[in-house]
Amino acid sequence: MDIDRTGLADFLRTCREALQPEDVGLPRGQRRRTSGLRREEVAALSHMSADYYARLERRRGPQPSEGMVAAIAQGLHLSLDQRDHLSRLAGHHPPARGAESQHVGPGILRILDRLDDTPAEVVTELGETLRQTRMGIALLGDASVRTGPGRSLGHRWFTDPGSRSLYHPDDHGYLSRVWASGLREVIALRGPRSRAAALAEDLLARSEEFRQVWATHEVGVRPRPVKRFVHPEVGLLELQCQTLSDPQQSHSLLVYTAVPGSESHEKLQLLSVVSAP
């Protein structure tokens, strides 16, 4: 497919001008004259240089890669239909939808953008974190540095003992059952050639504990509503986890909150201070 530079430039500009700063979690400021977002704001949201993005809107520069297109689609909070249209304009076939998709829907993103002072993350059905709030990073660590199968918390749980240190030791056995049960259910849903099945095969080859838990054929083991974390800076945190699901993308928004006035609530406030940029 060939790139449609004029169509791409016009579409990017239209989508950018339709967004307001508050739509993407940015402050408006008192002297703002731009209609919609500025180019440099979209570039920052898309993790690319302002010059690179500006050249696309000016019908110049190289053809953006599929990765660049995906980053722009996420930065502009595009819907799936808009993302697919952007891909075609850039000369690429649209990426997969559903369980294989890494594109977080705009509705989930709008909520996440308003939760910067609350630990929250968007995860796939395999436990891969796609987006985090600032406090989500402070609580759970920066997911952007993880690659390969290790992007899945379930995979890290059975292959990297250090990944368990954030969770209360008394919960480790139950959480192992949760991960194995959930993975078995996803495989039944997605099939024996799915990424979930490949993840299970890898774990069977690498973890004796996983082999033992897997052999029980448990299903329906659900996470407890209160999660206990042992954070290296603030200690024990007892947090309730609320979940908002996007069935179209098989993604979940996890929001971690503490009971107001509790010791965990005070520790979350302290964590917010010590992790402030």
Image (spheres, grey):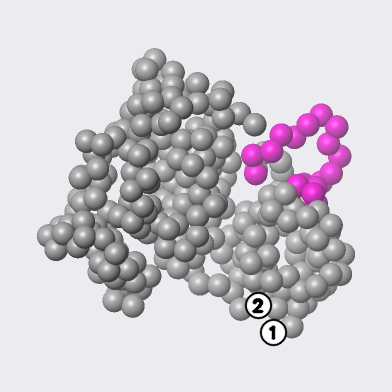
Quick one: SS at disc 1?
loop
Cα–Cα span, label 2 and label 1 = 6 Å
Residue 25 in the figure: left or right of residue 266: right
> Which contiguous range is marked in magenta?
24-42
| Quadrant of residue 116 within the rendered picture | top right
Picture disc at residue 92: 2
Residue at image coords 21%, 51%: 177
- Residue 237 x/y as whole percent: 36, 27
Give, as a three-letter code, the residue at label 1: Met
Per the image, is 171 magenta?
no
The answer to whether residue 169 of the structure is visible from this angle is yes
Q: In this view, does 238 lie above or below 20?
A: above
Q: Where is residue 234 in the image (x, y as percent from the top left)?
A: 43, 24
Indicate the position of residue 81 as horizontal and vertical percent values.
59, 67
Is the magenta region chiefly helix, strand or loop? loop
Q: Residue at x 68, y 50 (%)?
A: 45
**Quarter holding the N terminus?**
bottom right
Q: In this picture, is 121 found above or below 234?
A: below
- Please tell me how crowded label 2 is: few (under 14), some (14-19), or many (20+) other residues with Cα within 10 Å: some
| Residue type highlighted by circle 2 | His
At 50% from the left and 32% from the top, the residue drawn is 118
Q: In this view, does 248 lie above or below 254?
A: below
Q: Which mark is residue 114?
A: none
| Residue at which label 1 appears | 1
